[in-house]
Image (tube, rainbow, N blue to C red):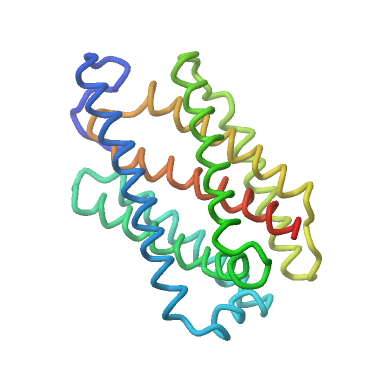
Amino acid sequence: MSDSIFPILIESTQEEKAVFYKKTYLHVAFSILTFILLESILVKIVPEDVIIGMMGSRMTWLAIIGGFWLLSMVANKFTMMADRNMQYAGLGLYILIESIIFLPMIYMAMFFSGGGVEMLTQAALITLFLFSGLTAVAFLSKKDFSFLRTGIIVGGFISLGLIVVGALFGFNLGLAFSVGMVVLAGASILYQTSQLIHKYQTDQYVGASLELFASIMLLFWYVLRILSSRK
């Protein structure tokens, strides 16, 4: 969290909370729309052999994952700084790297899995439905889901390890792994929404939106992966 003098949301007035929630979810929506725009441009301008090559080489894909992980930490740190320009720089950086890492998956879904735009639409609707449901649970129950943090961190490291091992040795992690990652993404959404309610300061809506956007994209990735595996 930043060192700002703004109050924690749970200690704020109802009006301050409403403004914070509105700004946060507007930023999430903006992030998603920007991602869609960037992805549409990348699919059109990046040559097919480059896109396929991103996943065709194990070491290349591991390098992409490593770069994504490092840049994600940088982007998250930026969004929690006091300087508003740095916050937006962090959010913009994260949207860009999500667009790049999603490029092979989106391209394969559109042109090689037989699902086309319809599959992407289905994955987006399922993701939206799950995200809305989990958000409603967090807000209506008003429960503090901070206890999920340890499980999310452990699950994240285990999943990252499996992804690296799978990339190194060339084996498919399968449907069970994708389902497990959907559960992990769902837990992350519950946790981040709970943090939104209980922990954030009223000026930290950019950082809050990045955390939610990241969880939504993780959920979308594995929902799309599950749908692609059925084709």
The image quadrant where one finds the C terminus is bottom right
- The N terminus lies in quadrant: top left
- Image mark count: 0
The relative height of residue 177 versus residue 42 in the rendered view (above or below) is above
Q: Quadrant of residue 150?
A: top right
Q: Which residue is at the far front? A: 118
- Find residue 82 and report its image quarter: top left
Q: Quadrant of residue 149?
A: top right
Q: Is residue 94 above or below residue 122?
A: below
Q: Residue at x 26, y 46 (%)?
A: 81
Q: Is residue 43 above or below residue 195?
A: below
| Residue in the foreground of this view, choosing between 113 and 55 | 113
Q: Is residue 173 left or right of residue 8?
A: right
At x 69%, y 75%, the residue is 58
Q: Is residue 154 above or below residue 115?
A: above
**Place of residue 124 in the rendered image (x, y in percent of width and height, measured from the top left):** 52, 48
Horizontal side, residue 104 vs residue 209: left or right: right
Of the pair 208 and 113, the residue shown nearer to us: 113
Residue at point 73%, 56% (across, down) = 162
Q: Position of residue 6 (x, y in %)?
A: 20, 27
User: Percent x, y for residue 8?
Assistant: 28, 22
Q: Position of residue 68 (x, y in %)?
A: 50, 62
Residue at 45 percent across and 63 percent down: it is 99
